[in-house]
Amino acid sequence: MNAHHTDVEEHDATNAYQSLSETTDHDDPRWAFGTGIVEEAGAEITSSVPDGVDPGDLAAYCLMLGDDALIYSHRLSEWVSHAPELEEEVALANTALDLLGQARVLLARAGHVEGRDRDEDALAYLRPDAEFRNVGLAELSDDLDFARCIARLLVFSSWRLAVLHRLQGSADPVLAAVAGKGVKEITYHRDYAARWTLRLGDGTAESHRRMQAAIDAVWPYIGELFRTSDEERRLVEAGVAIDPADTREEVDAVLDQVLEKATLTRPERPFIGTIGGRSGRQGVHTEHLGHALAEMQSLARRHPGATW
Amino acid sequence: MVSAGLRSSKGAVRVEPPSSEVSRAQGVVAGVVDPEMPMLTLDDLGVVRSVDVDGDAVTVTITPTYSGCPAIEEMRQDLRVALTSAGYARVEVRTVFSPAWSTDWISDDGRRKLAEAGIAPPGRAAAETVGPIPLTLTPPSSAVRCPNCGAPATEELSRFGPTACTALRRCPSCREPFEHMKEI
């Protein structure tokens, strides 16, 4: 795996891999799966846990918001080379990149706070599925159905925007900072999804049928978004977290506004339930997550610590 | 330690006049260019938050443009190389996320250089609203001047361009496509 540049290699300007490896000549080999430096360089990551806050709760909460972003980012990136048009591919990849950036900071913060010597990469690549804290909506596969991709992005971004918008005043400086940047980014994501929902819903009979089917398919996963976990309940008291139940009215209003303009019908379908009161936030996942992790983690697990 | 704040969350701010050792380090930092838009220096882009000097040690604090901006690692590396070459023995480049970067922090010089390179500079970022952030369902604004022919109205092809910070547009007058640095 170690592709470090050596003196015996002749310079070849057309060899992209060689020029990549040349950038690491400053005694700075990089782990192949990330740069692993956010904690070391990020001024906010190492700030102390706010007074009266249980570090375990804070780490869990950072993982919840971080895993939502990480897993959904991975699912969005599956569209690269499969989107209907190049512009949409670029848009979805950009959206995935924004979420990955949010995930890195949140996972690095979780790793720092929990104090178990796990950095962002260890948390992303070496945890089993039952330790992931993301909601079910983030882990679903779109099965390369573009309408499903848009429906899920509309719901996810409407919800996450409402969450981060409230989180900007968090007593935890990292959560507040991620929220401040994330709000700007997700406003663009939500507008993108809303415009496509209008275009497909109020388009041809076929695009309308498929957009409605996509909304129907993601609808059962909405209920989980507004469920408050025990950790969140305690952190709300400390001014660190927001209560996701409080975002319901705003998210509903946004979805109603878009669905109506798009001539789509708000589904009347039951939400997916919990298993013994547990769901994604407690590590209980759909079968989709294991497949996503198998792909996302396989290289890092097979070549631990590989550098390039 | 001697330090000089370059910018606050609300744009340029004058702190006490920098000492000569800080201004020398600042000069080195100011000469480092953005890896994705090399017509801009990091100072033009408004990502340099502070430069602190303590003997032969320098600490530079920068802020990423977008959360997932892949160029941040290159910026850190380029700053380290430039400052090490300028004779500083210990160089630390720190990243802060708050307050969040805004295109309003791009200098006037930076805006001019963007336009000269064929990239339409950003307009003013939207003011913060009270209450929920409103949806924008109307067609994208046409009020972006073509950097090639100067036509005042152009059309958006895609909100997301080749880098995280640009959108793709087209000019109906000269028919040229171009990038627009979108407001954030």
Image: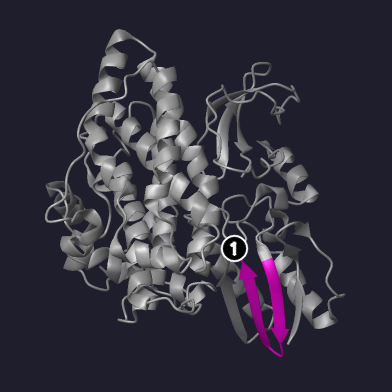
Q: Is residue B50 magenta?
A: yes
Please name the residue that numbered disc 1 is placed on: B98
> Which of B176/B160 is in front?
B160
Q: Residue at x 54, y 41 (%)?
A: B132
Tell me: B60 left or right of A149: right
- The vertical placement of A275 against A8, above or below, is above
Q: Quadrant of the C terminus of chain A?
A: bottom left
Quarter of the figure with residue A108: bottom left
Disc 1 element: loop
Q: Is residue A90 magenta?
A: no
Q: Quadrant of residue B64?
A: bottom right
* Residue nearest the viewer, comparing A105 with A7: A105
Near mark 1 (Cα within 10 A), the count class, few <14, some 14-19 or many ≥20, is some
Residue in view at x 27 percent, y 47 percent: A224
Residue at 30%, 22% (x, y): give it: A211
* Chain letter of the residue carrying label 1: B
Quadrant in the picture for residue B126: top right
What is the span of residues highlighted in magenta in the rendered image?
A: B49-63
* Residue placed furthest toward the front: A237
Of A107 and B35, the residue lying toward us: A107
Residue B167 in the image: x percent, y percent? 56, 35
Image: A79 above or below A30: above
Position of residue B18 measured from the top left corner of the image (x, y, whole percent): 84, 76
Query: Left or right: B79 with respect to A172?
Result: right
- Identify the colour scheme used: one colour
